[in-house]
Image (spheres, coloured by chain):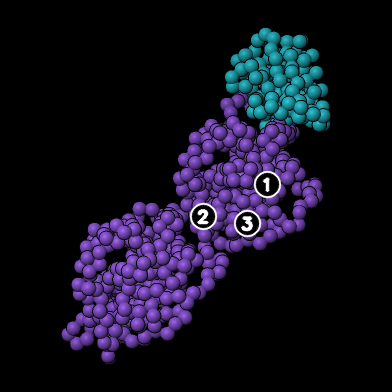
Amino acid sequence: MTATQEIPVDPVLERVKTGVEAFDDLVMGGLPRGRTTIVGGTPGSGKTVFATQFLAHGITDLDEPGVFVTFEESPGEIEVNMASFGWDIRHWREVNKLAFVDASPRDSDQIVVGDFDLTGLLSRILHAVKNAKAKRIVLDSITQLFDHFIADQALVRRELLRIATALKKEGLTVLMTAERNSEYGEISRHRIEEFVADNVVILRNALDRERRRRTIEVLKMRGSRHVEGEVPFTLVGKQGMVAVPLSSLRLEQQSGTKRVTSGNPQLDEMTSGGFFRDSVTLVSGATGTGKTLLVTHFLAGGVAAGERALLVGYEESRGQLFRNARGWGVDFEAMEADGRLKVVCLYPEAQTLPDHLLMIHELVEEFEPQRLAIDSLSALERIAPETGFREFLISLTSFIKKREIAGLCTATDKSLIGSHSASEQHISTLTDSIILLRYIQQADFMHRGLMVLKMRGSDHDKQIRRFTIDSSGMHLGRPLEDAPDVFDDAPAGRPSAT
Amino acid sequence: MSTGPRSGRGYSSLRLYVAGESPGARRALDSRKRLVTASDGKIDTQVVDILAHPEEAEKAGILATPTLSDDSIDPPRRLIGDISNIAEVLAYFGYSKKDSAP
């Protein structure tokens, strides 16, 4: 493969937006214009969706017509399959914004003898490009083309290179899909990426702890930088592919100094004036230690200060939450009626983690709360593999901060006394403040204790305070003296056997 | 590849899809002449230059050139690549000469 012509490429690579926002961020704004990108993936990994979205975004948002060369499904099938994402392919074809080159398998009786070329295909493609005045082109999938001429692989390689070169010369931004046999094996069958691609993107649909996890990864971008690593995505009706931004990429959140009340005057005192507006606080404790109570205070305190508050509950039903709140003298119903509070409860298992994240994004866009509580993160943790959960947390915390929302999340310890939860380890580095709630045994009596473990950028009370709960909520009492180590598993020493 | 059951049929037309003036196209056009001669005028071949008429290639779903195609039957019967072996070509399209069958 040496006879490639030298094709001048603008040194400053202009970017072509794909319509998958978070993906465009990974590649510094989009795919380089006039270049060829291979999108590899196993069957069902979302290649055709990504490819169609790339064309759809060009057509609907940027007035860049496209050509879809299909080697697999017929244009009619693609039309139907993509309709659920809100893409009106038929209309685009009618107004000549999208042209198909139908190279899907047709019923024909054919044999191949000797040498041939794929000028037939190339001239059809160029014809379609000219007619639609296309700027973007998709070839889906190249693997099918190889399979069509199964005995002539070297020839197909040669011809594919010729086609890619011709498309480049036309200034088209090219997206070719290629099948992979496994999620973490060679990049594509036939090693297409080696001879034809400037850029390589991998889509995955991996099974991890019995759960499907879709990710997108940029493997190679010739002549430009990109962000490394897999980014989760989800397929959303009426939208298409939505990648979940790992906003830690951009550490642009400014640290505000504005304080908001925790909803509990004594806790405000302990934290030297309340939580920071754009911060995330973690409340960690065993079941029954008062996490949901702190959440209730937090929400009620915000509403009392004239803010809007959003609660996303994963452990208890609305009925339970409202009943609990009433028991502590807080009327959630009235707050909701005033439009000051929104409570959304659902099972963690109802959707995937990226979907949960998107739902929270949407709720925040819609309701525009000044504070947000999530009860609890531990419930979410059980539905996701560890890496997925960490990505979720990074994404969630940076989103909360960027929107200048005061966030409060809870995490449930697995054992009743002391001990760390797994989520706590993840979360602790990502949250600005940590409040521990613990059962603490003293002589024959079990107390509840609260301590502010960490408060970024502020002084705080470091004592462990005993507290009681009554019909008006939580009341912090005197510091516990001679309290056992709150980090330890049990007074008798570690680790606790059962 | 069998020769198919249609031997001894009458006059028919094949289409030869070629790309402009490429060496492959010239070879194919050459073979076509010999083919017409060898068939005693029973086969007519229509040449389609897909560079000039890409819409014809689109309609017929042609990927490779040269392609010799019998579009009159369903599904169409196609021979891609080298069509210089006249006897084999005739056999493939069902005009088998008894003496040339392999």
Please state, as top left, top right, bottom left or bottom right, where the C terminus of chain A lies in the image: bottom left
- The residue labelled by disc 3 is A29
Is A48 situated left or right of A110 in this image? Answer: left
Q: The disc numbered 3 marks a residue on which chain?
A: A
Q: Which mark is residue A16?
A: none
Q: Residues within 10 Å of mark 1 (few under 14, many from 20)?
A: many
Residue A218 visible, this angle: no
On the same chain: label 3 and label 2? yes
Say which amino acid is labelled 3.
Gly
Q: Which residue is mark 2?
A: A243
Question: What hue represents chain B?
Answer: cyan
Q: Position of residue A34 (x, y in %)?
A: 71, 48
- As helix, strand or loop, the secondary structure at mark 2 comes to strand
Q: Residue furthest left?
A: A444
Alpha carbon of mark 2 to alpha carbon of mark 1: how far?
Answer: 21 Å
In three-dimensional space, the C-alpha distance between marks 3 and 1, rounded to whole angstroms, equals: 14 Å
Q: Which residue is mark 1?
A: A173
**Along the polypeptide, which appears first: circle 3 or circle 1?**
3
Mark 2 belongs to chain: A
Chain corresponding to purple in the figure: A
Q: Residue at x 53, y 44 (%)?
A: A49
Q: At x 55% / y 33%, what residue is drawn?
A: A90
- Decide: is A34 above or below A302: above
Residue A116, percent from left and from top: 73, 33
Q: Amino acid at mark 2?
A: Ala
